[in-house]
Amino acid sequence: ELKVEQNPLFLSMQEGKNYTIYCNYSTTSDRLYWYRQDPGKSLESLFVLLSNGAVKQEGRLMASLDTKARLSTLHITAAVHDLSATYFCAVDYSNTGNQFYFGTGTSLTVIP
Amino acid sequence: SAVISQKPSRDICQRGTSLTIQCQVDSQVTMMFWYRQQPGQSLTLIATANQGSEATYESGFVIDKFPISRPNLTFSTLTVSNMSPEDSSIYLCSATGLLSSGNTIYFGEGSWLTVV
């Protein structure tokens, strides 16, 4: 069974702190995506990770992929209130781009 | 990045009726998909919209309930048939395969349906 699990599901953190969101998936894939969703909005693409060991950074967010461990992480550095949103990882199981399975989502609240 | 437009953005529908959602991409794409996001939940893939042929449905979704069309490379429709309150969700169109986007998958703004 194809599964994509994230933890934690809910995260409340203070501004200035660091934290990591984890995304585990059940079947081999080397294509993983991270998205952000604000309340009442659609999904915004954050990162596309396409190989083992891939690391990408944008501002206070850094994503990495370990295909052997079937694990991706989204690390938040010195959180600010504007990062409050729900974050989803998604895995492409087909390797041809036509089957994406989304994680459970992590609802992040950054407290001033 | 691609612009994906969906219509309607929101609607309140009567039980037993059907509603068609339109998705227009501003450039040619290879793959288009329809997702459902129930309140407070993650996204679930409904089907892959295939150009000129029947859509490919995921487990738990059937053509009679969610007929899909894709007459060309930039346009697709999803119909939610015989609606019940359980169909109240956000329906999202997505696309990939744009020449300029690499492997990124883009999403429309979503269509928020409430069935009463």
Image (cartoon, coloured by chain):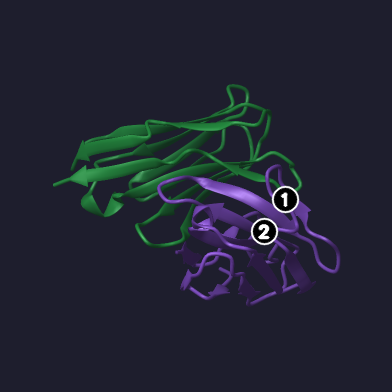
Chain colours: A green, B purple
* Residue occupying image coordinates x 49% and y 45%: B42
Instruction: Pick the residue in front: B47 or B84.
Output: B84
Looking at this view, name the residue that lies furthest to the top: A69
Q: Label 1: few (<14), some or many (≥20) within 10 Å?
A: some
Callouts 1 and 2 close, C-beta under 8 Å: yes
Circle 2 chain: B
* Residue occupying image coordinates x 78% and y 58%: B55
Tell me the distance, in whole angstroms, between the alpha carbons under discs 1 and 2.
Answer: 8 Å
Place of residue A25 in the rendered image (x, y in percent of width and height, measured from the top left):
58, 29
Looking at this view, name the residue that lies furthest to the right: B53
Place of residue B45 in the rendered image (x, y in percent of width and height, measured from the top left):
63, 49
The numbered dot on residue A106 is none
Circle 1 chain: A
From the viewer's perspective, is A21 left or right of A16?
Answer: right
Q: Are marks 1 and 2 on the same chain?
A: no
The numbered dot on residue B33 is 2
